[in-house]
Image (cartoon, helix red, strand yellow):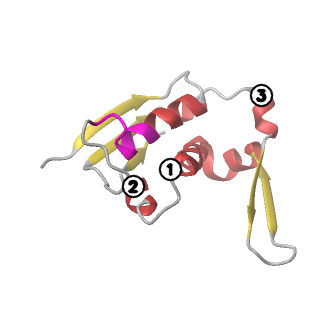
Amino acid sequence: MEKKIFKIDAAGQKLGRVASKATALLIGKNRVDYAKNKVFNVEVVIENAGKIDIFEGKLKTVYKRYSGYPGGLYAKSMEQLIDSKGKSGLLKIAISGMIPKNKLKSRIIKNLIIKE
């Protein structure tokens, strides 16, 4: 079975809308034979990620992660993430957060291609 390719143009669209569309396609929610325990042979290509629309108030949003050790809380604002990883990195973080946390997550996220 050949790989099905979906293209999403992110120019002028909101971050969450693009991320939720891409996540649904990656997981396979649009398919008739959807199952939670399957990784489908799809590829999602997001183009113009650098032109994504982000509201100025959202740039103050803080992304946190915790190592599990005392003093191990790391926090970065959306502005800092855009400076370090770019808007494509921010989009990948958003999509990764929407995919179910199970053994298939790493295999599903490999089917995502983001182009500036």
Q: Which is more toward the observer, 93 or 108?
A: 108
Residue 50 lies in the magenta stretch = no
On screen, residue 20 versus residue 104, left or right, reads right
- The extreme right residue here reads 71
x then y, percent, for residue 108? 39, 55
| Residue contact between numbered discs 3 and 1, judged by CB atoms under 8 Å | no
Q: Earlier in the sequence, mark 1 or mark 2?
A: 1
Q: Which type of secondary structure does the marked residue at label 3 adopt?
A: helix
Q: CA distance from mark 1 to mark 2?
A: 8 Å
Residue 35, horizontal then vertical, whole percent: 32, 49
Left or right, residue 31 beside residue 90: left
Going by the numbered disc 1, the residue's amino acid type is Ile
Amino acid type indicated by mark 3: Glu
Q: Earlier in the sequence, mark 2 or mark 3?
A: 3
The residue pinned by badge 1 equals 99
CA distance separating discs 2 and 3: 31 Å
